[in-house]
Image (spheres, grey):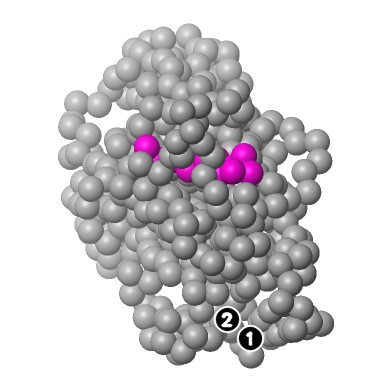
Amino acid sequence: MDKTLSRLLEGVNQEALTASSEYRRALCRTDPLLFAVIYLRHHISNPDTGEITFAEAHEEWADLALKWARPGITRPRDNRHAFIAPRNLGKSTWWYLIFPLWWAAYEYSHFTVAFANSDEQAQKHLKSLTNELNQNELLRLDFEALCKRKNNSKNSPEGDSRGFRRCGNGFTFVAKGIDSQSLGMKIDQRRPDTILLDDIEPDEANYSLYQKAGRLLTLTDAILPLEESANVVLTGTVTMLGSIVHDLVRANKGEDVEWVQEENFQVHHHLPILDNGDGTERSIWPGRDIFALDYLNAHRHTRQYAKNQLNDPKAVDSEYWSASDFTYGTFQCPNTYLSIDGAVTTKKTSDYTGIAVVGVTSEPYRRALVKASYQVKYKGADLRDYVLMVMMKHPEVNCILIETNQGGDMWLEVLHDMPVRILTVHQNVKKEERAARLLALYQAVPTRVMHAEPLPGLEQEMMQFPKGLFDDQIDAVGTAVLRWIKPEEKVRAAMSVRHPR
């Protein structure tokens, strides 16, 4: 027997469990896992064997669901959680059926709204929930008020066909596609206390970074403001490099993702294979064949595993850079540029300003070391202060390069009284051609451009080029590198000049 199931059933009076509604209700009041075992066994058991097993993540989710059942003083944006997990781990079953039913049964939630990528997908969540309310005999016996429909003023049952279910105990469940109108949603003057977001992005073939920007705006400007103090759950698997869910994964790794910080999401990134700490590994859900350790290891090297299990997509189909083009290391650089690709405005729709710190050397041949890369929306005095801060972190900088295609000589006015000389650069070559020249240097053998350490923001931008939303960091790096190294320069020729026979 699964150890979690064994623990749940320990001390349970089997005779009373069979005979007494009051006993069953009392058992499950503070245990959503036991609620699932008793009332929703058909959703969590193996369809072939009938066996019930739990993933480690399921217990973590249940602990959080229980905390929400004991509300204290909730501050705005206090309980926003994102659960990023491998496919088939049961995210939708637990977060869009089991926990909502448990919250509703004990009146821990009064108004839950669930959003999905489409109305059809959202309706499936509603149908699963209403099927239990209408057909689950044990649930109907023990929670009669929950399973009855609330009648309207004409004494007719409300809901279901219009995307919601109103229950006799006062609970309301609404299901919508994320792009449907939702501003100001209220039921009897009550706003949602729980907001669920399930796979709100389409598959990669039907999605782009431009569509992602619109979907993110819907999330932050329309959905989350429905109730600032609501409990929020966002579940998903990465559909595309640079997607909303990928942003959450990056934030969990410690990267600076502005919207994740602003919206105060706590990210739980579940991996399929876990480290035991002694050199051995274990599966997150050994009770299921698709999570058997041997099966996972057999597919561990594939792109599908990285994307669907690790939620770490690789842009192997990129038109320009791929992950294999990045080489890491360090070497002495007699000179270091601070390169700026500037934006004229700082509006939400404007470009960012890219800043790169690039060291260069001639020994044993011309090459460049990208030490740091930044993306900011500062202008004027704030931008000047930021540049000075970067220079404090990198005191070896002895020259500033500014691309003046946007803003012209304005940049000389902004960056006045710098401690190093400033050189301006006006680009006459198309962006794509400059990127191709820069890529050739990354791919040269031996490489002409290295990164001092992984630079996730820059590297993601490179792998998304030219389809990405931004390319300012690429331009900042390219301005410095291509000023120093010409792609057509052959390494062998450069070495022979410096070391004649």
Structural distance between the alpha carbons of marks 2 and 1: 5 Å
Horizontal relation, residue 304 to residue 144: left or right:
left
x and y percent of residue 480 in the render?
37, 37
Horizontal relation, residue 443 to residue 185: left or right:
left
Q: Is residue 79 magenta?
A: no
Q: Nearer the viewer, residue 331 or 284?
A: 284
Horizontal relation, residue 118 to residue 195: left or right:
left
Secondary structure of the residue carrying numbered label 2: loop
Which residue is at 59% across, 29% downward?
Answer: 191
Q: Is residue 387 above or below residue 77?
A: above
Q: Is residue 156 above or below residue 10?
A: above
Disc ID at residue 53? 2
Which residue is at 43% across, 21% downward?
Answer: 348
Secondary structure of the residue carrying numbered label 1: loop
Q: Quadrant of residue 391?
A: top right
- The residue identified by callout 1 is 2
Q: Is residue 278 above or below residue 458?
A: below
Q: Is residue 166 magenta?
A: yes
x and y percent of residue 363 in the render?
41, 56
Which residue is at 52% across, 12% downward?
Answer: 380
Q: Earlier in the sequence, mark 2 or mark 1?
A: 1
As shown in the figure, which amino acid type bears the numbered disc 2? Thr
As shown in the figure, which amino acid type bears the numbered disc 1? Asp
Q: Residues within 10 Å of mark 2 (few under 14, many from 20)?
A: many
Q: Is residue 419 above or below residue 102?
A: above
x and y percent of residue 407 in the render?
36, 13
Q: Quadrant of residue 144?
A: bottom right
Task: Specify the quadrant that holds the N terminus.
Answer: bottom right
Q: Which residues are magenta?
A: 162-172
x and y percent of residue 206 in the render?
23, 48
Answer whether labels 2 and 1 touch (C-beta < 8 Å).
Answer: yes
